[in-house]
Amino acid sequence: MTRFSGRHLLGIEPLEPADISALLDTAETLREVLTRPIKKVPTLRGKTIVNLFYEASTRTRSSFEMAEKALSADTLSISMATASVQKGETLLDTARNIEAMQPDMIVMRHSSSGAPHFLSRNCRSAVVNAGDGAHEHPTQALLDAFTLRQKRGRLQGLRVAIIGDLLHSRVMRSNLWLLKKMKADVILCGPPTLVPPGIESLAPCTFRIDEAIEGADAVMMLRIQLERMSGGFFPSLREYHQRFGLTEARMKRAKNNVLIMHPGPINRGVEIASEVADGPYSVILDQVTNGVAVRMAVLFLLLGGSEVAS
Amino acid sequence: MSRGVLLKGGRVVDPSQGVDASLDLLLRDGAVAALGENLAPDDADIVDIAGLVACPGFIDIHVHLREPGYEEKETIATGTRAAAAGGFASVCCMPNTNPVNDQAGITRFILERAAAADCARVYPIGAVTKGSRGEELAEYGDLRDAGCVAVSDDGRPVSDARLMRRALDYARAFDLTIIDHCEDPRLSEKALMNEGAVSTLLGLSGVPWVSEAMMVERDVLLAELTGGKAHIAHVSTASAVDAVRRGKARGVRVTAEATPHHLLLTDQAVKDLEYDTSTKMNPPLRCDADRRAVIEGLRDGTIDCIATDHAPHTIDDKMIEFDQAAFGIVGLETAVSLCLDRLVRTDMITLGRLVDLFAGAPARVLCLPGGTLKPGAPADVTVLDLDRSVTVEPSRFLSKGRCTPFAGWNLKGAPVMTIVGGKIVFSVDR
Ligand SMILES: [Zn+2]
């Protein structure tokens, strides 16, 4: 069976390529479970996992919950609306209280970059980062890589364009690390106001979407949060869509069978036109399906479950 | 004439007199009585400091003592004990207390507390504007008479250029220096650290170097316009150093300080310490080019003195998510050892220069008594042991604040005795 070197999954940056391969290979094995009539194996029976979500996220949270159930872990999901947290319990107190229940793992989504690092320093459980601020969203990058590998058979040498709000995107950061480590060619694109400083030392960056799409094997579109407009990052959604949105006409510059990806939720007509999101090249729903298998692999490898029953 | 104290057998380093020699130092009636070879007065207690270095008492002109109002973070009593333990005979305390030190009554309260604590000297800094709200000038005449040695709205900049002009101009009547915390409030909005490659990787919002540099340029120009005295607090960027350097070359009355953390750390520490909030302060740790430029400023005299920006907070203020944690770290009990080990032992600056940065220079910048061991000067002495090895252990700090990015650092060279007005207020058992 494959190995994984870490105790926590806080981000893709600290992982070795071998860790990433181990996770993707394990996901491959576990994906088969989800096609069975009874989608459940006893692998993590007796293990307790707490899902601690400080940010609303239907998609990621339900994906983790399905992965946990498929592996027969006992789970508890706690939703901490950020507004009520402001005056209430600190993260440290919450962590200590959860620790007192002796879970094996805490899966946390938090709006503060670095919150999972803080949690991992202050508790004994394994910590899985389900997205922290603008820092990382490692399981999203893993499921994106899994989807790419599934459709193209490899990651090495693929040309992947990541387009949109690079500044605020944890999905971009995790994907950038993962794709670089697995020797794919990444090109970044966004309006200059949404390009974080120093990113060009990690991957080439262009302000012209046509240039980014040119010859791409895959195009990952990032969500534009509508409140960015009030931050003065760009003048209007109309201009954003015209200059940085993915339209059918633009897609012609990509490779013939280009893969169109998006971490969701989609702003139709802003970063991506509906015809593209729903079109034949879109693998957006495959990403969602694969998310469960990838998260099963993360839980399995971190909790050292027994062999997958075949 | 009371009994004196004779510091015997040590090496005296006092750049104000160009002295670096084995000399005895006699203190009497709160003042330096004599400095010479083989002094043997018959009415003095002898303190053997063989193998140690005696310097003019160190002065930290940028300290947050938190009292009144935030006594859970620090008090004048705990802060002055921490100062003494760190080798500082005097501290200047910033006015961002609650209430703000913007009137004589509060200044007098601080001085009363300091007298009761009877440890390091405290020189209060008044507010530039009432309530440090940046709207109306505070009453500098009253503040000066009550004992304020400068004015500052530290914690925030004086953002209105017209108000800064008036402050620099008006303060001339009282010979007060305006100490400005330089940053552009809009460029700094929501910033958690320095903007650059590291903030990008960490996904933390950053403040660009320009924010500080613009404000320093403005202050230098306004000091030039008015003839007032501007002191730039905690300089952290290359461009700010350059602005001060050019101002000084034109004869503008501008001075500047740098903190040990900006001299020794970069924003990489935020990443290396994995978002530990001991790396969160304002101004933030900058990139290495900035850090090296600040050291260069220290070497060529552009930076006048070292100050700690000692900013204690409670555990609750710091043991939280990075973006929600308070800005600031403690510095009084680490500054001298850090500088001895990392600046002097590495030959970046000489011991004499360091003593000037900690004693003579801060006294000159704010026209304070002390900073020298000339006969007649206050009997304030800092004694250093250049061979003493110490490990930074926050749990042993006398300050209520424990947050420092230097925890666990092993350093060689430490303050071992602090004398204020001829009285030993701190000493290490040897
Ligand atoms: Zn300040």
Image (cartoon, coloured by chain):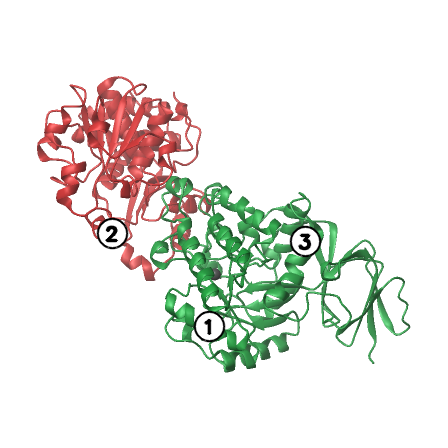
Chain colours: A red, B green
Q: Are marks 2 and 1 in contact (CB under 8 Å)?
A: no
Whole-percent x, y for residue A251 in the image: 14, 26
Q: Amino acid at mark 1?
A: Asp
Disc 2 chain ID? A
Q: Residue furthest front?
A: B250
What residue do we see at 52% from left, 72% from top? B67
Where's the C terminus of chain B, which quadrant?
Answer: bottom right
Q: Dot 3: what SS?
A: helix
Whole-percent x, y for residue A309 in the image: 30, 22
Q: Are marks 1 and 3 in contact (CB under 8 Å)?
A: no
Task: Name the residue beneath numbered marker 3.
Answer: B353
Q: Taking A159 as reference, is A133 above or below it?
A: below
Where's the N terminus of chain B, which quadrant?
Answer: bottom right
Q: Amino acid at mark 3?
A: Arg
Task: Name the residue beneath numbered marker 2.
Answer: A231
Task: Judge left or right: residue B190 versus residue A239.
Answer: right
Q: Which mark is residue A308?
A: none
Task: Name the residue beneath numbered marker 1.
Answer: B169
Q: Residue furthest top?
A: A153
Disc 3 chain ID? B
Q: Earlier in the sequence, mark 1 or mark 3?
A: 1
Instruction: Respond whether the residues carrying marks 1 and 3 are from the same subunit.
Output: yes
Inter-mark Cα distance, 2 to 1: 37 Å
Question: Dot 3: few (<14), some (14–19), or many (≥20) neighbours within 10 Å?
Answer: many
Disc 1 chain ID? B
| Disc 3 C-beta below 8 A from ligand 1 | no
Question: Dot 1: few (<14), some (14–19), or many (≥20) neighbours within 10 Å?
Answer: some
Q: Taking A274 as reference, is B49 above or below it?
A: below
